Image (cartoon, helix red, strand yellow):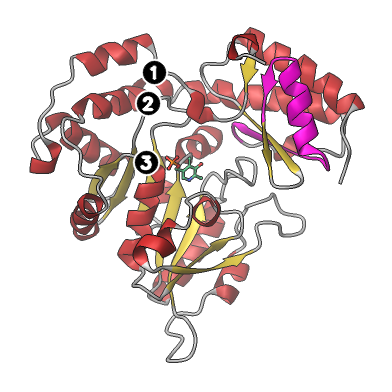
Amino acid sequence: MTSSTVIADLRSDTLTQPSPDMREVMMSAQTGDDVYGEDPTVHELEQYVAGLLGHEAGLFCPTGSMSNWLGVRSHVAPGAEVVCDDLAHIVRAELGSHGAFAGVTTRTWPAHIADTPVGQIQPDVISDLTTPKAGPYLVSTAAISVENTHNFGGGTIQPLDALRQVSTFAHENNVALHMDGARLWNACAATGHSLAEYAALCDTVSVCLSKGLGAPVGSLLVGSQHIIDEARVWRKRAGGGMRQIGMLAAAGRYAIDNHRVDLFRDHRNAVKLATAIAEAAPHALDPATVETNIVAANVANPVEIVELAATRGVRASALGKTTVRFVTYRDLTDEAIAHATSVLSDIFACAVALP
Ligand SMILES: *Cc1c(COP(=O)(O)O)cnc(C)c1O
């Protein structure tokens, strides 16, 4: 299939294209050498996002993977551990960077816990796994990392009261709390809570501008001034010192100011897709579990589903052995969503094998 026949590409919200107005703003952005600390547009964005999240300082990073890595490594000395769930992006999709470049070890709690949405945290499961000050024989836990929304869990939102409990437990035990908030914007759009309400519970938070918000590149790490100063050094050490990136920061700021509102539509479109799939194959998913812009269907033949959908102009991702994932985002037209809804409804009615 050539890309010209693709009608709805639902593989990821990273496929968003910079909008025409965003490109204009990038063209006229003020720039300077950011390694010298002289790019005013980057400064502004870092302060703005830190402010939105209620933290002292922020650092613009090329990717969410780097931003997560900088956050986690700021808490975890080589040989110590971060605990997270077994579907977390930091342990599944960052290619082992935390171990490879910072000596961080990990243990995981299960993302699948009976009767709760996949990826949703359970405070007692986390506290049971966490071993702060484990002594000279066992690995000590230095940080807990939670993902909000949870990507491979299907866009699951972390409940604020559960996060509060984890935060209290962590801080009573001198363990840091990092949040992989790549899609924290989506959690806020869905719940009405502010970014700061979530972020205030954490020591560091990483947010992405390059997912549903539609910036071409960029993530930010926020935390205390001390952590961010140190992260700036480590970013450069890792080869992530960038020069006239005001053009990228301007795109990010534009995305925050103008595209956050589009997330509501993304969420509605995800429910449309999920409803059509569930009508055709009720066991593949429960539309009530679709909280944001990600639809994860449970099937025994994800690769076949993806291939079949592709022949009819709908692209999706096969994740693991039993998940096919569809992600909505601002560039998908109403026609594309309608087409995808009808194609997926056909395919799930006749071709899906259930695990
Ligand atoms: C996309 C994503 C990231 C960051 O990914 P990059 O491709 O490195 O920017 C981190 N966490 C989650 C949950 C993500 O979905």
Q: Is residue 308 visible?
A: yes
Residue toward you, 218 or 178? 218
Residue at image point 66% right, 62% down: 110
On whether ligand 1 comes within 8 Å of the CB at mark 3, the answer is yes
Q: Is residue 164 magenta?
A: no
Circle 3 SS class = loop
Q: Is residue 285 visible?
A: no
Residue 315 x, y percent position in the rendering: 66, 24
Give the crowd class for mark 1: few <14, some 14-19, many >=20 residues within 10 Å.
many
Give the crowd class for mark 2: few <14, some 14-19, many >=20 residues within 10 Å.
many
Circle 2 residue: 216
Earlier-in-chain disc, 2 versus 3: 3
Q: Quadrant of the N terminus?
A: top right
Q: Is 58 displayed left or right of 286 in the figure?
A: left
Q: CA distance from mark 2 to mark 1?
A: 6 Å
Could you say which disc has been placed on residue 18 in the image?
1
Q: Are marks 2 and 1 in contact (CB under 8 Å)?
A: yes
Could you say which disc has been placed on residue 63 in the image?
3
Q: Which amino acid type is marked by label 2?
A: Pro
- Residue 122 falls in which quadrant of the image? bottom right
Q: Magenta segment range?
A: 292-316
Residue toward you, 1 or 203? 1
Q: Which amino acid type is marked by label 3?
A: Thr
Circle 2 SS class = loop
- Residue 328 falls in which quadrant of the image? top right
Residue most toward the right? Answer: 350
Earlier-in-chain disc, 1 versus 3: 1
